[in-house]
Amino acid sequence: MSENEKDLTIESYLEFLRNKKLMGTKCKDCGAMYVPVRKLCIKCNSTNMEWIEMSGKGEIAAFTTITVGTPFFVEKGYGRNKPYCFSVITLQEGPMVSGQLVGVDESKPDTINVGMPVKATFLETELKGETRVDLGFEPI
Amino acid sequence: MGKLARKVALVGAGMCKFGRNFPLKRNPDMWVDAWIKAVETVDNGIEPKDIDACYVGNYSSDLFNHQGHLGPQMANLVGLTPKPAPRFEGACASSGIALRQAIIAIASGVHDIIAVSGVECMTEVSTTQVTDVLATASDTLFEYPAGATFPGLYAAVASAHFHKYGTTAEDLMRVGIKNHENGKENPYAQMQSSIKEMMQKKIARLEKEGKDVPDWKDEFDYLKSASNPIIASPLRLFDCSLITDGAACLFLAAEDVAKKYTDTPIWITGTGQGSAALSLHDRDDLTSFIATKESARQAYKMSGLGPKDIQICEVHDCFTIAEIVAMEDLGFYEKGKAVEAIKNGETKRDGILPINTSGGLKSKGHPVGATGAAHAVEIFKQMRGIAERNRQVKFDVERAMTHNLGGSGGTCVVHIYQK
Ligand SMILES: CC(C)(COP(=O)(O)OP(=O)(O)OC[C@H]1O[C@@H](n2cnc3c(N)ncnc32)[C@H](O)[C@@H]1OP(=O)(O)O)[C@@H](O)C(=O)NCCC(=O)NCCS
Ligand SMILES: [Zn+2]
């Protein structure tokens, strides 16, 4: 099945991620762009949507380094002495998206800044014998 | 549209002591305590037979206590079965929603008197589990895998606010210091001490143990030290609300019957509710909560009042940054200007706009689903002039507001109260 024939569902979006592709959806009527996927354009109510691959480039809109994490991140080895960075990224194409920010010094949040340019990276985690892929970002 | 078909009054309000109450007190115990306290405040008494329904606000007894279906359980404990007992959920705004729905039901004529309940028991599980349960109020599909926690989401908002308006960590600290000063005066608060007192206690303890005593000049030094660890930068421990067990109870009556219960009803003249995309990344502005703006707009319009008319307000300070953003979104201050007002002491108990006289979620505690109802309890006390200890504001409160924010701003409920 070619990319553009994939159903406009969350599962397809996640499958793209697993294949290390950051895909958005674009409204063919008004041009609005969405990441993650939407089947219904909330700007113009159109269902005339198509998949579009994102460049993965963007900049930090908001971020934080977290010491008291969720069980998933605790399992990944993060904690009081090893914080991780949660970030909201504004993609070059316009939409914002959340991802773990890696390749930064999480113990020195002062060295990370809103507006810093980043690019997408695909983070693999071994969990219960399976590999899961999550969207992440790293400084350019 | 946007009007109440008949007036609705708050005729009684009470809460149980907030704190780490489990296992000594569970949801049923705390709710009955709150009910008894609220009954005591109804001047001419109120009995279950007078009440038409019990509206329960609770976020997640399902995940915190492995107990769903809380409505009838709570109703039965106070003798309200077989009357209707629905439960409302909107994360931390759950009982704010229950209050609003009760107002709408009374205004519509379906019911005359409703008991509103807010309950939450959070300490049955560990902090990691609490963090996980709370995180289900964010977008679990796309924020959670990125590592979002509740402190983390508000910390992200803080990073954007810092960047855009130059807000600083010290500005946040002032919110916590003020709220603890208030909570110290609240016998129902979880942490009844000022930050200065906690600092002095810590110094005394270190001296006694013969350890190095840091030379903290004031609370700010203490708050910048390792005694106040980062939870999610820039938010430290003392920027976070508490993990709390608690319950609150409100009695609402239609104008036709309110006078039977009291000569001094408090009218709820404005109610508003708003929503926003669950994930921060789906919003246009990360320094503001659109659900707050929308609910405030509705409540102001309904009551005919504006931000300048409000004399005191309980705002949802789940994190210190949230109080600052709320002060701006509710229209009290221009964007970026709230921190200056806090610095000038305007929002202290003796300031021109006292905010969170109860101690706020920071010091009073934040049993998430009970918080909206507990906000109204504080306003009831302040408007009646019965706030405990040294907490009562020094002027007659004619017009007040409560602001109850759910999750990372996905839901908001605002109410306006008048004498
Ligand atoms: C910040 C937080 C993670 C701290 O939890 P914790 O690390 O498990 O803390 P503990 O319960 O182990 O307490 C450690 C100490 O800090 C104190 N403490 C805990 N939370 C505190 C807070 N928020 N502010 C000040 N002191 C706090 C405790 O009283 C205890 O003091 P002690 O050692 O003198 O007894 C937790 O309070 C939290 O998650 N708060 C936010 C809750 C939230 O997100 N609510 C929903 C908002 S939308
Ligand atoms: Zn469109």
Image (spheres, coloured by chain):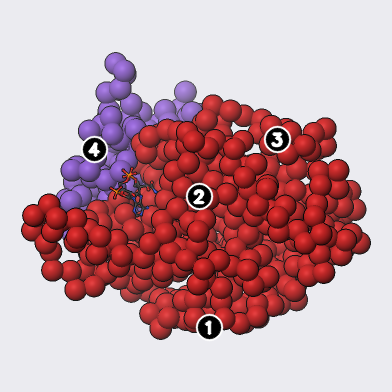
Chain colours: A purple, B red
- Secondary structure at numbered mark 4: loop
Q: Residue B77 bears which disc, if any? A: 3
Labels 3 & 2 near each other (Cβ < 8 A): no
Looking at the rendered structure, the kind of residue marked 4 is: Tyr
Residue B138 in sight from this viewpoint: no
Residue visible at 41% across and 69% down in the picture: B181
- Amino acid at pointer 1: Ile
Instruction: Give the percent coordinates (x, y) of residue B146.
Output: 36, 41
Residue drawn 61% across and 36% down? Answer: B28
Query: Which quarter of the figure is the N terminus of chain B placed in?
Result: bottom right
Mark 4 falls within which chain?
A
Q: Are marks 4 and 3 in contact (CB under 8 Å)?
A: no
Q: Are marks 1 and 3 in contact (CB under 8 Å)?
A: no
Q: Is residue B59 above or below residue B342?
A: above
Which of the two residues, B305 or B380, is positioned nearer the viewer here? B380
Which comes before the other along the chain, label 3 or label 2? 2
Crowding at dot 3, Cα within 10 Å, few <14 / some 14-19 / many 20+, comes out as some
Q: Is mark 1 within 8 Å of ligand 1?
A: no
- Cα distance between the residues tagged 4 and 2: 32 Å
Q: Residue furthest top?
A: A129
Check disc 1 and report the residue beneath it. Answer: B352
Residue in the image at 86% along x and 43% along y: B49
Q: CA distance from mark 4 to mark 3?
A: 44 Å
> Badge 2 sits on which subunit?
B
Tell me the mark number nearer the camera, choosing from 1 and 4: 1
B161 to the left or right of A123:
right
Q: Are marks 2 and 1 on the same chain?
A: yes
How many angstroms separate mark 2 from mark 1 (CA)? Answer: 28 Å
Q: CA distance from mark 1 to mark 3?
A: 42 Å
Residue A78: numbered disc: 4
Name the secondary structure under disc 3: helix
